Every structure is written in structure tokens, then in C-alpha cells.
Amino acid sequence: MIDLHTHSLFSDGVLVPSELIRRAVMNGYEVIAITDHGDASNLDFIIPRVTTACRELGKRWNINALPGIELTHIPPETFGALTKKARKLGAMIVVAHGETLVEPVHPGTNRAAIEAKVDILAHPGLITRDEAELAAKNGVCLEITTRKGHSLSNGHVAKMAGATGAKLVIDTDTHEPGDLVTDEFARTVLLGAGIGRRHIDEIFQNSRELADRAIRKFK
């Protein structure tokens, strides 16, 4: 499993980074990115600490651990500056908390995040065709999620990606141990989103390509 969207207790997860990474190892993960919720107030607190954990544990255990951030509920007009700041601080994966159906995310967040060229637009809810087309143009991956609630729009996201050529990835949005999944379960979620079996390997490859680019920069 390559999972580029997870949370530790540096935001609203329940595990310290070492336990989150260890449990990922035991679940057979190849790559995990720790992408705690961030805004202008805490990027400089979270990213360096997660970076330390990922560097140390990635050397000792059979996994590639990557530091990242999920820009969450921020004013849409700040995405550009905060994405640049996060990358400068060492975030290898920048996720945007998209316009999920189950939270009051500010309208315009999806487009602003895509324009800022984040890596992944997480759980983007009822993303429009125009936004999906822009994501394809800007190289922003749209997320299919295994997380309850956020997954309600998986089918719509898959449909918009299929119509526009936007790339999809699948992540867990893990907050606690039981949220980690196997490759087999991830494939089932993709099938449930209406994605044909012949396209599922492409989605896993999208995650691999994004992870590989980040790993090369992190070394």
C-alpha cells in the first residue's frame, strides 16, 4: 500500500509518528506520508517534527516515510503562499483538504488548491468538471478515499476524473490504527466507486509515481 494521506497526534490523529509508521510497516505498507492538518499557525511546528521522525524511522524500518501536510479549512486565497511555505519547510507531499460533503469547507477551496498546484486534492466532494480539467492540466491528483463520510462522493470524483483525464490516487486519511487498509481493501473501494478493474492498476501507479518523486527529493 502507498498511502499519502495520514494523521498523527500532531493534529487530530491518535498515534505518535513512530507508532503510526510502525503499524504501517506491519500492514505491509511500502510508503506512508504523514500529512497532519495545518494552517498558517502551525506549519513551522508540524513539518520539522514529522520530518525528523520520517528520516530516523525510514532508515531503520522497511518503509519509505515522508513528511507532508494537509492544508485544512484555510481561506482559499492563502493556498498559494501556504503551499510554497510548506514545501520550503520540507513537506514532500502537500495535500489540500477539499470540499468534502461532510464538513463546512469554504467554497472555492477546490479551485484555489488546484491553482496552487498542491500534490493531492483530498476528498473533493462535488468537484466540477472545470475544476477536474484544471487538475489534469496542473498535475494535481484527485483523491479516492477509504475514510467514512468523505467517501460519499467517491463515485462522483471518479466520474469527473474519467471525463477529464485527471489522475486519481487512493488514500486512507488515517486518524487511528483501524483506518489503515490493505491493497486488497483499497481495490474494493475503487470498485465501489465505479472504477473498472483495468483502471485500478493505473491509480496505484499514480500513487507510486507521486511517491517516487517525493522519495527522490527527500533523500
Image (tube, rainbow, N blue to C red):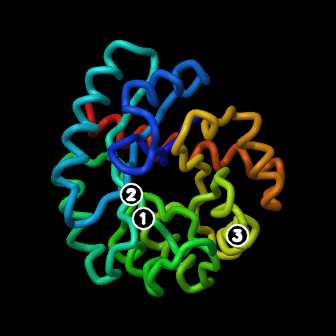
The CA distance from mark 2 to mark 3 is 19 Å
Q: Is residue 75 left or right of residue 106?
A: left
Q: Which mark is residue 159?
A: none
- Three-letter residue code for mark 1: Ala
Mark 3: which amino acid?
Answer: Ser
Residue 93 lies, in percent from the top left, at 36, 50
> As rendered, which of 83 and 215 lies closer to the eye?
83
Q: Report whether 113 appears left or right of 134.
A: left
Examine the rendered structure and indicate whether residue 82 appears above or below residue 67. Answer: below
Determine whether 49 is above or below 98 in the image: above
| Precedes in sequence: disc 2 or disc 3 | 2
Q: How many marks?
A: 3
Left or right: residue 38 compared with residue 178: left
Q: Residue at x 37, y 32 (%)?
A: 17
Q: Is residue 76 above or below residue 174?
A: below
- The dot on residue 70 is 2
> Dot 3: what SS?
helix
Residue under the image location 32 percent in, 80 percent down: 75
Which residue is depicted at the point 58% across and 48% down?
171
Say whether marks 1 and 2 touch (CB < 8 Å): yes
How far is mark 1 from mark 2, CA to CA?
Answer: 5 Å
Point out which mark residue 153 bears: 3
Q: Secondary structure at mark 1?
A: strand
Measuring from the top left, give residue 62's x and y in whole percent.
45, 16
**Callout 2 crowding tier (Cα within 10 Å): few <14, some 14–19, many ≥20:** many
Q: Earlier in the sequence, mark 1 or mark 2?
A: 2
* Residue type highlighted by circle 2: Glu
Among the two numbered marks 1 and 3 on one chain, the one whose residue lies closer to the N terminus: 1
* Neighbours of disc 3 within 10 Å: few (<14), some (14-19), many (20+): many
- Mark 1 highlights which residue? 96
Quarter of the picture holding the C terminus: top left
